[in-house]
Image (cartoon, coloured by chain):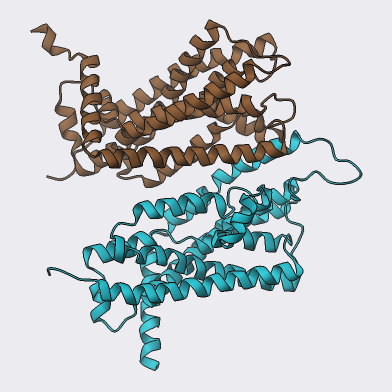
Amino acid sequence: MAASEHPHYGRVFLTFVRNSLVRDMTFRVNFLLDCVSSTSWVLMNIGFYLLIFRYTDQIGADTGWGKYEFFVFLATTMFINSVVQAFFMPNAEEFSELIRTGNLDFALLKPIDTQFLVSLHKVEWASLANFLVGAALLALSLWRLLTRPDDPLVIDALAVVLYVFYIGCGVAILYSLMIGLAATSIWLGRNQNLYNFWFYITNFSRYPMEIYGGRYGTPLRWFFTFIIPILVVVNVPARLMARPLNMSLATHWQLPAFAVAATLVSLLVSRWIFQRALGSYRSASS
Amino acid sequence: MHAQLTTWWTILRICLEERLVYRGDFALGTLMRFLPIVTQIFLWWAVFQALPAPTHGQAQNIAGYSYQDFVAYYLLTMVTRAFSSMPGLASGIALQVRNGEIKKFLIQPIDMLGFLLLSRIAHKLAYYSVALGPFTLVFALATWGGYFTGWPDATTLAAYAASLVMAFVLGFFLEASIGLIGFWFLEVNSLLFVYMLFSFFLSGHMFPLDMLPEPWRTLVELVPLKYLAYFPAAVFLEKITGPELLRGLMGQAAWLVFFVLFCRVAYQRGVRRYSGFGG
């Protein structure tokens, strides 16, 4: 029975997706309230940036991150964050609970890759509401950029393909960081502070990397690009789409090329941490 | 009278001891809470870089705030928030109403609001004793970096101290009021959410409220949220002076009295409305 030895990952994932949807639809009003609450935070955030752009034309001198370029950036942040929040966040939170209570035993017994099972078994559909807000914001900003009288933006098919590809890379990098941090709770027992740490760290990824300049900013930018590569998460796809300034040919492909490498290394390292952590798992209780 | 004081003192001491159990975790958490401000500071640095060059000796500013003022402002709102934020107060009261725990205050000779206020004071004292380290460190660094240009005069400092203390009491009674609405609604989470959403943006800890255009400018003048973050910071930076300062302090005091009275009335009516079932 060779077929039964290897579970069909796609089909299992679809089952997770369907089950979560059924669960969410059981409490429909609650689901709607969740959607409203997550989108209203995002809308307030847009309001904050609208306020900033009342006082300035662009963020950073000669960076080209004008109002609508920056809104493309913001929309990209929303896409990536909503996907991470919908698919991985609830699971990472539950993971440390599984470890604390010893329920991880049941996940280990199942004939399927443990990381796959632990990372994906729950989907929070309400978080995808921000994906729609992001799509609307992207459409509006791109329309403004495409139709502006001087130097209108030109988008080709390649840019669109690369944009989607690098959003995938960004999600993968954030996922690696999250599952890596969550796996450390096997060693630490419980780590509430690590989750705060995750939020604070990803906070750095929400702005164009040009803002980290000067005496303190440059080392910070270097650190968050090459050591913990969270600055490439949003910056690379957003730049490809909004093209805030005419970069020289070299910088045009160097950062995207680095982002692919960073994604692969992040995934491998987080996989390695996860396996190592599972190796030292000793079931709680009994 | 003496017995009353002893009771309050005991309550305060118990709460204080309870709060100081996890010191290390606490200090680390406090220091990490400065991290989002780091990104905010870089954001404003970039915004100031893009402003047109200063003309006629007039320093670059946004709504009257120089770049240094912005950094100082964010750090000062952290201080105000350390006084005015009341995590879990409203939801805690509503939960006690819902699960019936509130009846212990009905049979014991202790006033619930007084007890909660004391335990908050203890919580805050414990917090300051631990947070003083990280806060001193950050403010020393900021002064060294030239973001603060020394202390304001004594009158401003006195007004600042008064506004901070009132921010604490106002924060307490405002959140307690929301919690007490639980006598009527049982579940106040969605109400609390709306409150948090607005307080996040309109209390001024995201940006100085002077930046807002009309009609928002008038709106934040009309609601008490600005006293929970913006007002004390602006007083320290001497953005609000003279008669305006006096008017501000009186406004804060008026809101405070309003919410104290609201709490008293809501509690009395609520208790009369309350019915407990089961053991």
Q: Position of residue B21 (x, y in %)?
A: 37, 63
Residue in the picture at 67% in, 40% down:
B44
The chain assigned the colour brown in the figure is: A
Which one is in front, B160 or B256? Answer: B256
User: In the rendered image of this protein, does residue A242 appear above or below residue A250?
Assistant: below
Chain B painted colour: cyan
Against A84, is B269 above or below?
below
The residue depicted at 61 percent of the width and 28 percent of the height is A70
Residue that extends furthest to the bottom in the rendered view of this protein: B1
For residue A100, which quarter of the picture? top left
In the image, taking residue A91 as reference, residue B77 lies left or right, namely right
Q: Nearer the viewer, residue A271 or A34?
A: A34
Quarter-of-image position of residue A214: top right
Q: The N terminus of chain A lies in which quarter of the figure?
A: top left
* Viewer-side residue, B64 vs A165: B64
Q: Is residue A43 left or right of residue A244?
A: left
Quarter in which the C terminus of chain A is drawn: top left
Q: In this orientation, which residue lies closer to the viewer: B111 or A260?
A: B111
Residue A233 place in picture, x, y as percent: 51, 24
Count of residue discs: 0
Quick one: which residue is furthest to the right in this view?
Answer: B56
| Residue at figure coordinates x 15%, y 25% from the top left | A110
Percent x, y of residue B206: 58, 48
Residue at the left extreme?
A1
Q: Is residue A218 visible?
A: yes
Could you tell me residue A196's position as x and y percent? Answer: 43, 44
Q: Position of B39 compared to B61: left or right? A: left
Q: Specify whether residue A261 is in view.
A: no
| Residue situated furthest front in the rendering | B215
